[in-house]
Amino acid sequence: MLRAAYVIARRDFTAVVLSRTFILFLLGPLLPILIGMALGGLGERIATTDLRPVVGVAMNAADAARMERAHARLTERVGAQSLPRLQRVPLSPAPEMLLARPGSGVAAIVSGSPQHPVLTGKPGDIDKLEGDISLIASAALAEKALHMVRVERKEVAKSLGAQAQGQLAIGRIAQIVIFFLTILLAGMILSNLVEEKTNKIIEILAAAVPIDAIFLGKLMAMLAMSFVGILFWGCTAFAVFAALKAPGVSLPVPAVGWPVFLLLGTLYFAMAYTLLGSLFLGIGAQASTVREVQTLNMPVTIGQMLIFFFATYAVDHMGSPPEVAAAVFPFSSPFAMLARAAQDARLWPHLLAIVWQAAWVALIIRVGVLLFRRHVLKSGGGWWKQLFRSATG
């Protein structure tokens, strides 16, 4: 059966990878990323644009200078975007008339003195600016008495709290990556099987090789194709990260170390993909049109998203009943165990988890084959006998 599965896998793999549309498939996920980066740069430019409200300062020269010095001192600590801009305005005419003058450019005017500031403006603007003007005036009054306390630096080489937070972040990011890769790539199995059913190719293959080999071969081919795509996207992401990485910035190290973590990430992606892919194979085996595939695909995808949210909830509750349940349940197990690898250095639970997930893959494929025989090929006897019979039988 393995030899027949290899033949099916090689046939499907070469048919997909050597096609012209595969290049578009590889470039497809990069386009939303490039658009997102462009929109992010535009948003950052908009955010850094000085959109702070401007407050006019209608005070004598000495008081206005004190307010400006206090404003500069505060913005050094809290950031320029945290406080409104100050702009000197003439002492006459009255603030009300200055605000009503076309092209004044100020949202409100503070007059009087730092000891008794008077803020003139619309009620909504006063509500927003009152606290900031009070802070600036207080700092102006304490100009000579206000001294910044020097903080002594005491550096350490390791902080377990920061390390735990970094490992938790690595686990969450890894979960998101393999989830979206699985959802993105597993859907191709459905369309592939439905297309071959429509063209009557699947019946020809079923007459030549065991159905188990067809299902397993298609799963292997799509998994290999997925690794080609991941290799391309991963190299692109690494090149972008290396080009944009700030000097001195380093990633947190997972508990098992980066080499083992990347290996486990590859294995858990393969398990998540084959678990969902084998389920999609069973669904595609029952559907005869693309519309039926879309109808059956939606509940499975929604269920997978709920399972993913459950796994992400359990990631920061190591050892709790929800985390153990997420690690045991086969469809959430790859996500939960990958997050555990980022936070726990023990390796033996991963060996058990991979064997457990592989057993479920075999069971789901077997059930899919049984349903395909009974409902598509209209063959087969008792389902309990077919479910547990040997693959070579």
Image (cartoon, rainbow, N blue to C red):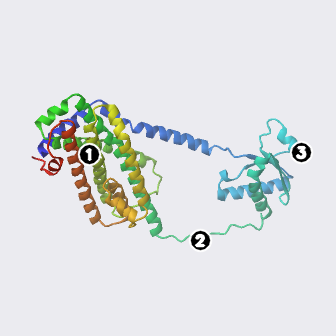
Kindly tell me whether residue 323 is visible in this rendering: yes
Q: Nearer the viewer, residue 116 or 183?
A: 183
| Residue located farthest toward the left when viewing the structure as drawn | 393
Q: At which x and y percent is residue 385?
A: 14, 49
Marks 2 and 3, how far apart at CA: 49 Å
Residue highlighted by disc 2: 152
Residue highlighted by disc 1: 278
Asked if residue 195 lies left or right of residue 171, the reply is left
Residue drawn at the location 21% of the way across and 36% of the way down: 376
Q: Secondary structure at mark 1?
A: helix
Residue highlighted by disc 3: 94
Asked if residue 362 lies left or right of residue 258, the reply is left
Amino acid residing under circle 2: Glu
Discs 2/3, front: 3
Marks 3 and 1, how far apart at CA: 77 Å
Discs 1/2, front: 1
Amino acid residing under circle 1: Ser
Say which quarter of the image contains residue 143.
Answer: bottom right
Q: Earlier in the sequence, mark 3 or mark 1?
A: 3
Asked if residue 52 lies left or right of residue 237, the reply is right
Residue drawn at the location 30% of the way across and 47% of the way down: 276
Q: Residues within 10 Å of mark 2 (few under 14, many from 20)?
A: few
Q: Earlier in the sequence, mark 1 or mark 2?
A: 2
Q: At which x and y percent is residue 365?
A: 22, 47
Amino acid residing under circle 3: Ala
Tell whether label 1 touches label 3 (CB within 8 Å).
no
Q: Is residue 65 above or below residue 24?
A: below
Q: Nearer the viewer, residue 348 or 306?
A: 306
